[in-house]
């Protein structure tokens, strides 16, 4: 595989870098097909986020019990009373008892002009300061409230104290924040909290623990439901990708190879899966969690929270810059995975040659070079992933530090007590956790977007049937197959594989294609199967251009036996029945007998149910070839193509395969691609190709006399043939000589008595 061609193709298809690319959004639809699971997961995530914020809110009651003498109910009563009064008060502990003191009075307050000043002592008689605050907090909105206050420094009960000043004030209506706080605190008995602080602490912490347990149960369920939906969606995506790849035209594989497709099946889909899990899991859960924490922060201090949000634009810029680079780096990494898999699989498939030529060290160096190339992309991606969380955390720490300075100044100015400061600091600090996790989500989705781009380039490729198939039905061959002035050139080739070829093959005729390597024999067969279409000229089937015929029906008329025996990893029965899964045991055994395979199959331990391993590794070359012929016999197609079916087998298998060919070729139109005269000598007609052209055609004896190229091919083939080959030739002679010769009126492109074609 040419890495440069991949990168060039990738550059030509460049897309704007963004978090959710169009192709990644398309992958979301695969998981969204299981929307019930996703919606259930979202609901569980919502409950988790809400309960997580509730457990954070439990920090303040704990701090109040431990740090502040006023206690939880006292704090709620005081803050509610202060908001309703419009000025701040506090309870000061003295040797002679507790005193209720004015902390501050805002400018413009109605009582500021009436003589109420900071430090004035409020007389709560006959109630205690705590009870007075609770009374103010509980009065209805708009109620007129009167109280007495003594000037600062005099004390409410000191001897010779100046007269108390009576103040009258209309109480403000309670706001939502204070009402919520009062309702929540009201769930815990006041006497319990005030009577035994340790017991109250145990009660509150128990509530926090229960809430945390329930929250994390919902978190587990959220991730479980989302994972279920995403994994099922990936099964659908892989199934569609597999179906698409199987329907791609042969030109697609010729241009790109298979290693990159394997990478897309494995690595790209895995990246998409991780991206979708992050998208539906973390990208939903973490923002929800952050949202509820922000809501809690707004509840505690809206101004401070708004000030913290100024770091969002800076964080967004960091996300965009790093995510863009991560997506590019991952796309190149995925391409390099394809190159490495291609190189590794090639070495493994030729391990016998590697060992025979003692090139282990050379192959190891080549693989090391591929690994080093991949390392560069992996390291760049790792660096980008490592840079994003620290960058965001630094921004967050700067924001929290600025907020802490502000909070600290309010504590020093006695506008905020220590417990409130600590809770705000904890809540703002907890915002860092979702930010860190969202940073990881961003890089995962960026990588998933790169994988989705590559996957959908395959899925969007028009399948062979839709792109190249016609609409005419195809039946068994009635008359002839014709190639009319056919010229074909492979992509990026320097010269045509076939040039101005004319050939007619009549029904029931056996035609052998011979010629040196690269002469165009296999290409001609590929055109008959419509793996490719000629650039000029046409191929006709009973007078109809192949391009007008239904592609699947055309190929059902042909049985193909290739030089390389293709055996799948399964049982012998499954391999014979390949393409006819509905075949009965009787038909399968009959096909094996006619292919002379039944004898060795029955001798094996598990017979037809024995597994043959990857590529049929448990079988010999001749056994594999006979199973392939049995498969062709079972297919029972009217046109038969043999591509060097006996070139790589032993003498015994060679003879049996020729006998199987005789059985299979009877009453069928047969095309033989062969090098050995024993295979093609008694064909009805032999077509000689060279350099993509037909140079001569006719019977064996006539060609041997007049065609020098044919004589040299025969001489070379005979010198390479095994000594025991004559029995096989004799068997094939019996096969082909028993066939019915074509009628004298048969039309052929190259008559035997014509001069050689140049």
Image (cartoon, rainbow, N blue to C red):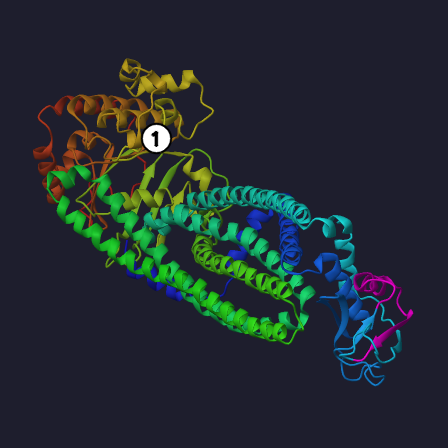
* Left or right: residue 339 compared with residue 290: left
Front residue of 312/163: it is: 163
Q: Determine whether the residue tagged by mark 1 lies in a helix, strand or loop.
A: loop
* Left or right: residue 164 compared with residue 533: right
Residue 678 spot, x, y in % from top left: 16, 29
Q: Residue furthest front?
A: 159
Taking 353 as reference, is 415 above or below it? Answer: below
The residue under label 1 is: 569
Magenta-colored stretch includes residue 144: yes
Total number of numbered discs in the rendering: 1
Residue 626 spot, x, y in % from top left: 28, 24
Front residue of 166/504: it is: 166
Taking 517 as reference, is 500 above or below it? Answer: below
* Left or right: residue 235 compared with residue 347: right
Magenta-colored stretch includes residue 697: no
| Quadrant of the rendered image containing residue 75 | bottom right
Mark 1 packing: few (<14 Cα in 10 Å), some, or many (20+)? some
* Left or right: residue 756 compared with residue 444: left
Residue 249 spot, x, y in % from top left: 40, 48
Front residue of 515/141: it is: 141
Taking 327 as reference, is 281 above or below it? Answer: above
Q: Report if residue 234 is visible in the image.
A: yes
Residue 614 spot, x, y in % from top left: 31, 32
Q: Report if residue 743 is visible in the image.
A: no
Tell me which segment is drawn in magenta: 124-151
**What residue appears at the point 37 percent right and 49 percent down from the top-left corner?**
263
């Amino acid at each position: 595989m040419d890495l440069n061609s991949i990168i060039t193709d990738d550059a030509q298809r460049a897309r704007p870098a963004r978090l959710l690319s169009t192709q990644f959004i398309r992958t979301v639809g695969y998981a969204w097909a299981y929307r019930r699971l996703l919606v259930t997961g979202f609901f569980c995530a919502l409950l988790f986020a809400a309960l997580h914020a509730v457990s954070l809110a439990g920090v303040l009651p704990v701090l109040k019990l431990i740090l502040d003498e006023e206690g939880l109910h006292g704090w709620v009563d005081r803050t509610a009373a202060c908001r309703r009064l419009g000025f701040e008060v506090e309870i000061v502990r003295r040797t002679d008892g507790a005193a209720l003191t004015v902390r501050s009075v805002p400018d413009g307050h109605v009582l500021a002009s009436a003589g109420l000043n900071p430090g004035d002592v409020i007389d709560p008689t006959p109630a205690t300061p705590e009870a007075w605050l609770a009374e103010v907090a509980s009065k209805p909105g708009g109620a007129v409230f009167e109280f007495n206050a003594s000037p600062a420094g005099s004390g409410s009960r000191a001897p010779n104290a100046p007269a108390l000043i009576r103040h009258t004030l209309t109480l403000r209506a309670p706001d939502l924040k204070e009402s919520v706080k009062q309702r929540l605190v009201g769930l815990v008995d006041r006497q319990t909290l005030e009577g035994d602080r340790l017991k109250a602490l145990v009660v509150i912490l128990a509530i926090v623990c229960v809430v945390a347990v329930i929250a994390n149960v919902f978190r587990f369920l959220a991730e479980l439901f989302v994972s279920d939906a995403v994994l099922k969606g990936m099964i659908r995506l892989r199934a569609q990708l597999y179906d698409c790849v199987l329907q791609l035209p042969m030109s697609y594989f010729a241009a790109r190879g298979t290693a990159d497709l394997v990478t897309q099946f494995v690595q790209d889909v895995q990246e998409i899966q991780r991206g979708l899990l992050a998208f539906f899991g973390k990208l939903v859960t973490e923002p929800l969690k952050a949202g509820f924490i922000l809501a809690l922060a707004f509840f505690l201090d809206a101004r401070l929270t708004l000030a913290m949000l100024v770091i969002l634009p800076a964080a967004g810029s960091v996300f965009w810059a790093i995510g863009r680079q991560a997506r590019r780096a991952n796309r190149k990494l995925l391409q390099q995975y394809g190159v490495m898999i291609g190189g590794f699989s090639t070495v493994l498939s030729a391990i016998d040659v590697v060992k025979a030529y003692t090139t282990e060290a050379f192959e190891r160096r080549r693989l090391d070079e591929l690994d080093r190339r991949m390392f560069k992309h992996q390291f760049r991606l790792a660096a980008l992933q490592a840079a994003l969380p620290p960058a965001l955390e630094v921004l967050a720490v700067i924001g929290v530090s600025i907020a802490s300075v502000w909070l600290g100044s309010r504590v020093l100015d006695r506008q905020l007590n220590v417990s409130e400061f600590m809770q705000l600091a904890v809540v703002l600090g907890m915002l860092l956790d979702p930010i860190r996790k969202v940073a990881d989500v961003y890089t995962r989705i960026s990588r998933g977007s790169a994988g989705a781009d590559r996957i959908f380039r395959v899925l969007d490729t028009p399948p062979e049937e839709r792109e190249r198939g016609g609409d005419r039905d195809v039946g068994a061959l009635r008359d002839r197959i014709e190639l009319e002035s056919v010229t074909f050139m492979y992509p990026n080739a320097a010269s045509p594989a076939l040039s101005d070829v004319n050939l007619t093959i009549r029904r029931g005729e056996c035609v052998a294609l011979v010629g040196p390597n690269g002469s165009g024999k296999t290409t001609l067969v590929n055109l008959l199967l419509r793996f490719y279409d000629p650039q000029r000229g046409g191929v006709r089937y009973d007078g109809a251009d192949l391009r007008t015929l239904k592609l699947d029906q055309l190929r059902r008329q042909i049985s193909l036996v290739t030089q390389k025996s293709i055996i799948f990893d399964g049982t012998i029965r499954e391999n014979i029945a390949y393409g006819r899964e509905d075949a009965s045991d009787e038909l399968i055994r009959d096909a094996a007998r006619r292919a002379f395979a039944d004898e060795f199959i029955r001798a094996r331990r598990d017979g037809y149910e024995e597994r043959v391993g990857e590529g049929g590794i448990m079988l010999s070359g001749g056994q594999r070839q006979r199973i392939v012929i049995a498969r062709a016999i079972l297919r029972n197609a009217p046109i038969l193509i043999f591509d060097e079916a006996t070139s790589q087998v032993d003498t015994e298998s060679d003879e049996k395969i020729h006998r199987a060919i005789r059985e299979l070729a009877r009453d069928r139109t047969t095309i033989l691609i062969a090098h050995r005269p024993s295979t093609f000598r008694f064909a009805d007609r032999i077509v000689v190709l060279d350099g993509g052209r037909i140079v001569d055609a006719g019977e064996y004896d006539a060609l041997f006399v007049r065609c020098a190229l044919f004589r040299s091919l025969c001489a070379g083939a005979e010198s390479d043939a095994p000594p025991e080959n004559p029995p096989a030739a004799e068997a094939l002679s019996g096969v082909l000589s028993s066939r019915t010769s074509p009628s004298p009126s048969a039309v052929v492109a190259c008559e035997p008595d014509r001069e050689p074609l140049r």
